C-alpha cells in the first residue's frame, strides 16, 4: 500500500497565535484519511491521538520544518512505510586501505 497524501495524527497539539490554526505536537504518526488507525497500525482512539487532516505528512518532518516546531518524535514505522529518502544514509562509505 503506497500512500502519497498521508495526513498526520499526533499525541499533542498547539495553536498558532498568528492564525489560530491547531498543529500537531509531541509524537506524530502518518494517518490515511477515512481510516481509524495510523499507517503503523495504532488505533487512533485507544492511543489518544488527535487527527490533523489539514497537515500533510511531509510538513511535520524535521527536515522540512514547516509545521514541525512542536514535534518531538516522528514514528519510525510510519516514516519507513511512507518511504524515507534513499540518499539519507546514517553511514558513509570509506576506503579502509587509504588510511
Image: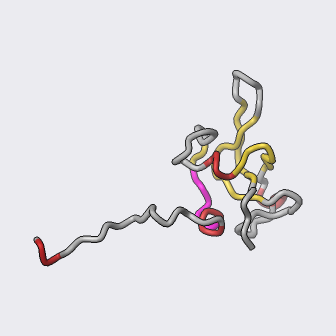
Image: 85 above or below 99: above
Residue, far left: 99
Q: Is residue 59 left or right of residue 37?
A: left
Q: Position of residue 95 (x, y in %)?
A: 20, 74
Please name whichever residue, 87 or 91, is drawn nearer the observer in this view of the structure.
87
Look at the image and give the residue range highlighted in magenta.
73-77
Report the residue that reaches farthest toward the right. 34
- Tell me which residue sits at (70%, 28%) in the image: 16
Q: How far across and how far down the image is residue 62, in percent?
A: 54, 47
Q: Quadrant of the N terminus?
A: bottom right
**Left or right of residue 81: residue 91:** left
- Taking the spot 31% from the left edge, 67% from the top edge, the residue there is 92
Nearer-the-camera pick, 3 or 50: 3
Residue 75 counted in the magenta span: yes
Rendered image quadrant of residue 70: top right
Q: Is residue 28 left or right of residue 85?
A: right
| Rendered view: 57 above or below 18 | below
The percent coordinates of residue 82 (x first, y second) are 65, 65
Amino acid at each position: 500500500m503506497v500512500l502519497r497524501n498521508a495526513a498526520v495524527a499526533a499525541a499533542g497539539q498547539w495553536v498558532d497565535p498568528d492564525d489560530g490554526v491547531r498543529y500537531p505536537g509531541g509524537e506524530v504518526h502518518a494517518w490515511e484519511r477515512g481510516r481509524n488507525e495510523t499507517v503503523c497500525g495504532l488505533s487512533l482512539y485507544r492511543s489518544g491521538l488527535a487527527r490533523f487532516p489539514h497537515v500533510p505528512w511531509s510538513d511535520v518532518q524535521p527536515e522540512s520544518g514547516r509545521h514541525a516546531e512542536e514535534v518531538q518524535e516522528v514514528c519510525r514505522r510510519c516514516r519507513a512505510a511512507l518511504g524515507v529518502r534513499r540518499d539519507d544514509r546514517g553511514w558513509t562509505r570509506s576506503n579502509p586501505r587509504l588510511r
